[in-house]
Amino acid sequence: MAPCHSMRYVSAYLLARLGGNDSPKESDIKKILSSVGIDCDSERLSKVVSELDGKDVDEVIKEGLTKLASVPSGGAVSAGGAAPAASSAGEEKKEDKPAAKEEEEESDDDMGFGLFD
């Protein structure tokens, strides 16, 4: 069962629960989905209803969040790779600033007079 397609059934189930139906049936979910033009796959619908029937939805969501927290996202790896590049760019800027100061100091040393003027 493809997860993206199952989410429509879970979402409709949750909408029914939010609407006050403590135990949504397949017919309730079909009605919600058909109202937005989605045809139901009765096998997937039965699976979702049987898995969620009698469970506390809040607990199911909390359990899912803890599972998601343990899944590596890959974003941290990219951020780690970008950090050294950013710091090296910052170091380059720091190096440029002292060079500019040295040039200013040199121009102050001649005080407007050139050696060969």
Image (cartoon, helix red, strand yellow):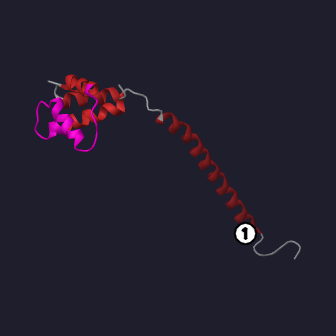
Q: Which residues are magenta?
A: 15-42
**Residue 77 part of the magenta segment:** no
Task: Please state which of residues 2 and 52 is positioned toward the viewer in this rendering.
Answer: 2
Please state, as top left, top right, bottom left or bottom right, where the C terminus lies in the image: bottom right
Q: Which residue is mark 1?
A: 108
From this view, report whether residue 26 is shown above or below residue 18: above
Residue 6 locus on image (x, y percent): 31, 31
Question: Going 24% across and 39% down the picture, which residue do you hit?
Answer: 33
- Quarter of the image for residue 99 reads bottom right
Question: Going 66% across and 52% down the picture, which residue do you hit?
Answer: 95
Please state, as top left, top right, bottom left or bottom right, where the N terminus lies in the image: top left
Question: Going 28% across and 29% down the picture, which residue do you hit?
Answer: 41
Task: Please state which of residues 27 and 99 is positioned toward the viewer in this rendering.
Answer: 27
Mark 1, other Cα within 10 Å: few <14 / some 14–19 / many ≥20: few
- Quarter of the image for residue 50 reads top left
Position of 21 with respect to 8 (left or right) is left
**Residue 18 part of the magenta segment:** yes
